[in-house]
Image: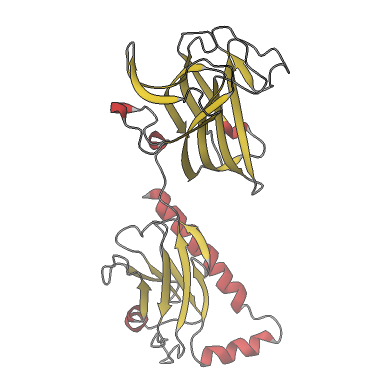
């Protein structure tokens, strides 16, 4: 509540300052301002402003008029679509000698919704002059925040649930087809196993999930998961860029462009081409946990687009569990 009141006070102070600057009697403008006070009232400023996006759902609607207004007639002239939860008269507040009207909905606005606010022509100043012309503007509220524990969906593969994940594979015709399934692994009741029988033709399989979620512009953002490599090639070396496990996070950076964060995992190193700079050694047949701070990336992520778990090579036996994106 204190945060909301503080935000309200800040917005109100800014709008009143704007009103004062707009109405300031600078040189020849003073005469014009005096004439406007004798005529119809004007709307000097509004918040949220026209076209504004990502507006907090707990915001109030602020309107500054050029002169003191008749409370009842001005309140009755207010409308908003879709209609928020309003309680008359407690949702309406008049400030600064009735030149500022603030409408505070009784409940939060809807997420990711375009609102149109209208002040009808019947809004009347204390001196009896009406606004005369209807005034409308629009803004859009912020998208519903996603709880980090929900990302990605079924990241723990509980009860064999794979909904939300998309599986794909590729390989030469007639060669072993990669498989994926949720299995019990020791004390772990559920883990995702992606496997391909050994062959001498390259293959690839991946499981991915579209996230398309905004992440905070400040603070820490992590991706983490558990991994176990089986004896994936029976000591037959794989080719360069082929790894039995790979993590790929596609994200939108602060520069407005899409980027990839990649980590690969191996036990048997490839013979040709060496290892990629993003490759990490892990022991065979042992669960290991990996966690990465995405907020240190340059450019910093502002939206996580997709998470991909990939296996490639001649054959593999790879398990994943507890996939999480958190902040």
Along the viewing direction, whichever of 318 and 81 lies nearer the viewer: 318
Left or right: 63 in relation to 256: left
Left or right: 216 in relation to 271: left
Along the viewing direction, whichever of 20 and 183 lies nearer the viewer: 183
Numbered marks: total:
0
> Horizontal and vertical percent for residue 57?
40, 57
Residue that sits furthest to the right in the current view: 273
Q: How is the image coloured?
A: secondary structure
Corner quadrant of residue 132: bottom left
Along the viewing direction, whichever of 113 and 96 lies nearer the viewer: 113
User: Residue placed at 30% from the left, 59% from the top?
Assistant: 107
Residue that sits furthest to the front in the current view: 174
Corner quadrant of residue 115: bottom left
User: Residue placed at 64% from the left, 49% from the top?
Assistant: 256
Q: Is residue 204 above or below residue 211?
A: above
> Horizontal and vertical percent for residue 120?
40, 84
User: Residue placed at 56% from the left, 31% from the top?
Assistant: 248
Q: Is residue 224 above or below residue 258?
A: above
> Horizontal and vertical percent for residue 307?
51, 35
> Horizontal and vertical percent for residue 32?
63, 89
């Amino acid at each position: 509540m204190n945060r909301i009141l503080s935000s309200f006070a800040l917005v109100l102070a800014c709008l009143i300052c704007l009103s004062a600057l707009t109405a300031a009697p600078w040189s020849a403008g003073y005469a014009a301002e005096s004439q406007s006070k004798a005529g119809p009232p004007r709307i000097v400023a509004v918040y949220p402003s026209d076209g504004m996006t990502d507006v907090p759902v707990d915001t109030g609607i602020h309107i500054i008029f050029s002169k003191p207004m008749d409370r009842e007639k001005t309140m009755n002239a207010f409308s908003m679509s879709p209609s928020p939860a309003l309680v008359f008269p407690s949702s309406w507040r008049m400030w600064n000698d009735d030149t500022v009207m603030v409408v505070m909905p009784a409940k939060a606005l809807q997420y990711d919704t375009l609102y149109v606010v209208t002040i009808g022509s019947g809004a009347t100043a204390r001196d009896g002059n009406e606004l005369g012309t209807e005034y409308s503007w629009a803004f859009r509220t912020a998208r519903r925040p996603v709880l980090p524990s929900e990302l990605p969906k079924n990241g723990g593969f509980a009860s064999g649930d794979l909904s939300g994940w998309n599986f794909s594979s590729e390989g030469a015709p007639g060669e072993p087809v990669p498989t994926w399934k949720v299995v019990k692994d020791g004390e772990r009741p559920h883990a995702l196993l992606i496997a391909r029988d050994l062959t001498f033709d390259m293959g690839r399989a991946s499981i991915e999930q579209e996230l398309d979620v905004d992440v905070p512009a400040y603070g820490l953002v992590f991706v983490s998961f558990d991994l176990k490599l089986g004896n994936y090639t029976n000591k037959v070396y794989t080719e360069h860029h082929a790894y039995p496990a790979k993590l790929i996070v596609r994200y939108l950076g602060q520069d407005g462009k899409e980027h990839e964060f990649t980590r690969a995992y191996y036990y048997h190193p490839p013979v040709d081409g060496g290892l990629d700079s993003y490759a990490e050694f892990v022991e065979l047949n042992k669960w290991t946990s990996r966690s990465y701070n995405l907020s240190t990336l340059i450019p910093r992520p502002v939206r996580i687009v997709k998470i991909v778990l990939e296996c490639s090579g001649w054959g593999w036996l790879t398990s994943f569990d507890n996939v999480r994106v958190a902040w």
